[in-house]
Image (cartoon, rainbow, N blue to C red):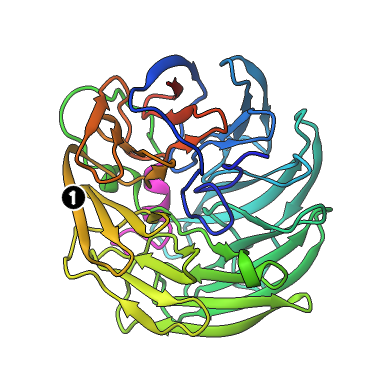
């Protein structure tokens, strides 16, 4: 079974593979897969790597770098915003989102806006489509159909459930969690939050900020410094699922709505039961939350603050003493240490929040770190970094211009990383 079958490795999004990897990375191969933004590689039990792109294509690449298959999942103009997920049966789940521009001329001037709708697709390891689930419409007529820019998360063994956040938005957004079974049936739709004003605001419309990075994410990575945050926007947070230890049969689902609320729910009796909520007074775009084996939830946000909460009660455990630049991506953890990337910085923290070490990269990143038993990998703007666990030693492969998609670690120790120029790279030891 692969240790990296979902976004950030696992349902809890811990970003950790419990295997050693060597200090020196050797280039094995690369393959063109199309334009990719926040979608990161996931790895099947047989070593096949799955990646979705902004053209709506899901690619399956063999461990030797050959293309096994590529499949367009939806209509022209749809795209894959997040990472796929793989269940224990080998089935692949991936979300496509379709965007359409609507022009309203009734006021005498042209007003442009977007509508969005998502589908969850399930495919076999051979690339055969099992089913497609269309996100349901909201019950209030003026809302659009549900859409998501997040990665699906899976819980369960042979009879898995898929959890995915859905946004319904015009002037008063609503956020839900959809729970879907392995046959594509909607088991539960749970209202998480609702607001009287759009969570995402700009001078040119609620969804424009989300779509801007899609209108030209292809670019030559050479030539000057690039502001990745402005270019690609803010990654929509994915949920995480605490399914370890005592939570194996009744997992805890944690969701950040990317606006004001972080909340935890227990899945029991085929429904979500709220455990706690943290509501901010001010809007704060946030990174995906993480559930660590210490039974703590770690959440970062755009003001540079990282906070740890008790998984069951929501009580605040600590905030590190330092304040970073915006935290776009989830933290990762190996035993008692926590790793975080923010802008040009890589941080290693003790479990109580004390700073172990920090390193400043040449460029920035908005991706998440990946950890093996003895190394930390960061897809930086200026290349792929390999760190020792204390960050005191590092190497840099500057052939990989990255900074957006997060690395993945295969069972044989291969490191997979996607650059900003349509290529998936494989490195070994």
Vertical position of residue 95 compared to residue 260: above or below = above
Q: Mark 1 points at which residue?
A: 358
Q: Does the magenta stretch include residue 314?
A: no
Give percent across and percent down for residue 128. 80, 32
The one nearer the camera, 395 or 105, is: 395
* Start-end of magenta stretch: 201-214
Q: Quadrant of the C terminus?
A: top left
Number of marks in the rendered image = 1
Give percent across and percent down for residue 347. 24, 52
- Give the residue drawn at x 59%, y 42%: 3
Magenta segment, principal secondary structure?
loop
Give percent across and percent down for residue 378. 33, 39
Asked whether, in this view, residue 150 is left or right of residue 329, the answer is right
Vertical position of residue 226 compared to residue 397: above or below = below
Residue 170 visible in the current orientation: no
- Give the residue drawn at x 49%, y 48%: 8
Which quadrant of the structure image shows residue 89? top right
The one nearer the camera, 405 or 296, is: 296
Q: How crowded is mark 1: few (under 14 residues within 10 Å), some or many (20 or more)?
A: some
Which quadrant of the structure image shows residue 122? top right
- Give the residue drawn at x 75%, y 32%: 125
Residue 48 visible in the current orientation: yes
Q: Quadrant of the N terminus?
A: top right
Give percent across and percent down for residue 121. 72, 45
Asked whether, in this view, residue 352 is left or right of residue 134, the answer is left
Q: What element carries label 1?
A: strand
- Give the residue drawn at x 27%, y 59%: 349
């Amino acid at each position: 079974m692969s240790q990296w079958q979902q976004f950030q490795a696992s349902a809890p999004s811990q970003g950790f593979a419990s295997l050693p990897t060597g200090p020196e990375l050797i280039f094995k191969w690369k393959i063109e897969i199309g334009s990719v933004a926040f979608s990161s590689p996931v790895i099947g039990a047989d070593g096949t790597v799955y990646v979705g792109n902004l053209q709506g294509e899901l690619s399956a690449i063999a461990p030797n770098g050959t293309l096994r298959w590529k499949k367009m999942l939806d209509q022209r103009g749809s795209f894959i915003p997040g990472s796929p997920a793989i269940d224990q049966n080998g089935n692949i789940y991936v979300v496509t989102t379709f965007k359409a521009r609507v022009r309203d001329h009734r006021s005498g001037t042209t007003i442009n806006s977007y509508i969005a709708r998502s589908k969850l697709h399930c495919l076999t390891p051979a690339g055969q489509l099992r089913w497609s689930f269309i996100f349901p419409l909201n019950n209030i007529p003026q809302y659009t159909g549900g859409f998501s820019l997040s990665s699906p998360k899976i819980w369960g063994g042979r009879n898995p459930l898929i959890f995915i956040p859905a946004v319904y938005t015009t002037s008063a957004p609503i956020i839900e969690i959809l729970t879907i079974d392995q046959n594509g049936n909607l088991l539960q739709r749970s209202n998480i939050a609702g607001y009287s004003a759009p969570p995402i605001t700009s001078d040119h419309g609620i969804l424009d900020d989300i779509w801007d990075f899609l209108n030209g994410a292809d670019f030559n990575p050479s030539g000057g410094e690039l502001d990745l945050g402005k270019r690609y926007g803010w990654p929509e947070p994915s949920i995480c699922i605490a399914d370890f230890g005592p939570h194996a049969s009744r997992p805890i689902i944690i969701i950040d709505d990317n606006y004001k609320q972080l909340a935890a729910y227990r899945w029991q009796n085929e429904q979500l039961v709220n455990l706690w909520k943290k509501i901010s007074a001010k809007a704060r775009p946030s990174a995906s939350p993480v559930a660590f084996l210490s039974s703590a939830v770690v959440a970062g946000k755009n003001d540079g603050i990282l906070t740890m909460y008790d998984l069951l009660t929501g009580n605040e455990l600590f905030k590190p003493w330092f304040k970073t630049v915006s935290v776009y991506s989830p933290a990762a953890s190996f035993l008692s240490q926590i790793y975080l990337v923010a802008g040009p910085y890589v941080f290693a923290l003790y479990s109580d929040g004390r700073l172990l070490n920090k390193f400043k990269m040449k460029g920035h990143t908005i991706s998440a770190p990946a950890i093996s038993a003895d190394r930390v990998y960061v897809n930086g703007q200026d290349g792929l970094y390999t760190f020792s666990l204390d960050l005191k030693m590092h190497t840099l492969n500057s052939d990989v211009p990255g900074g957006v998609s997060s690395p993945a670690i295969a069972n044989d120790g291969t490191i997979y990383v996607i650059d900003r120029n349509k290529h998936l790279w494989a490195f070994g030891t």
